[in-house]
């Protein structure tokens, strides 16, 4: 099918998939932990930063 072509027997399909808190993917906390460790940072440091920063708490 050429780009932009819609046929009568195939309706256009649209959708939006949202993933909150690791329902469809890995848990955000697990990802932060793995990334912190891979970068030589203290485990959990990235996830804790917004809570320790006044600007992060405001956001």
Image (cartoon, helix red, strand yellow):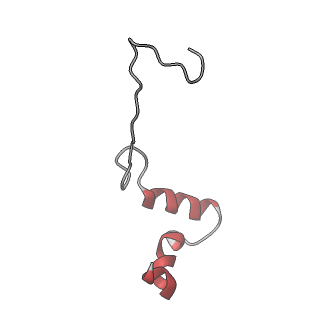
Whether residue 24 sits left or right of residue 4 in the image: it is left
The location of residue 19, given as percent across then percent down, is 38, 49
The location of residue 15, given as percent across then percent down, is 39, 37
Q: Kindly give the residue lying farthest to the top in the view shown.
A: 9
Quadrant assignment, res 12: top left
Is residue 53 something that shows in the picture? Answer: no
9 relative to 39, above or below? above
Quadrant of the image containing the C terminus: bottom left
18 relative to 57, above or below? above
Instruction: Count all numbered tags in the image, as a single digit.
Output: 0
Residue drawn at 49 percent across, 77 percent down: 50
The location of residue 28, given as percent across then percent down, is 44, 58
29 relative to 59, above or below? above
Residue drawn at 45 percent across, 14 percent down: 7
Q: Kindly give the residue lying farthest to the bottom in the view shown.
A: 54
The location of residue 23, given as percent across then percent down, is 34, 47
48 relative to 7, above or below? below
Residue drawn at 64 percent across, 67 percent down: 40
Is residue 22 something that shows in the picture? Answer: yes
As rendered, which of 25 and 40 lies closer to the eye?
A: 25
Residue drawn at 54 percent across, 58 percent down: 34
As rendered, which of 10 and 48 lies closer to the eye?
A: 10
Whether residue 27 sits left or right of residue 2 in the image: it is left
Quadrant of the image containing the N terminus: top right
């Amino acid at each position: 099918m050429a780009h932009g072509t819609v046929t009568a027997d195939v309706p256009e399909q649209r959708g939006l998939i949202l993933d909150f808190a690791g329902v469809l993917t890995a848990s955000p906390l697990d990802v932060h932990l793995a990334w912190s460790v891979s970068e030589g940072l203290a485990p959990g440091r990235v996830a804790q930063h917004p809570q320790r920063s006044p600007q992060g708490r405001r956001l």
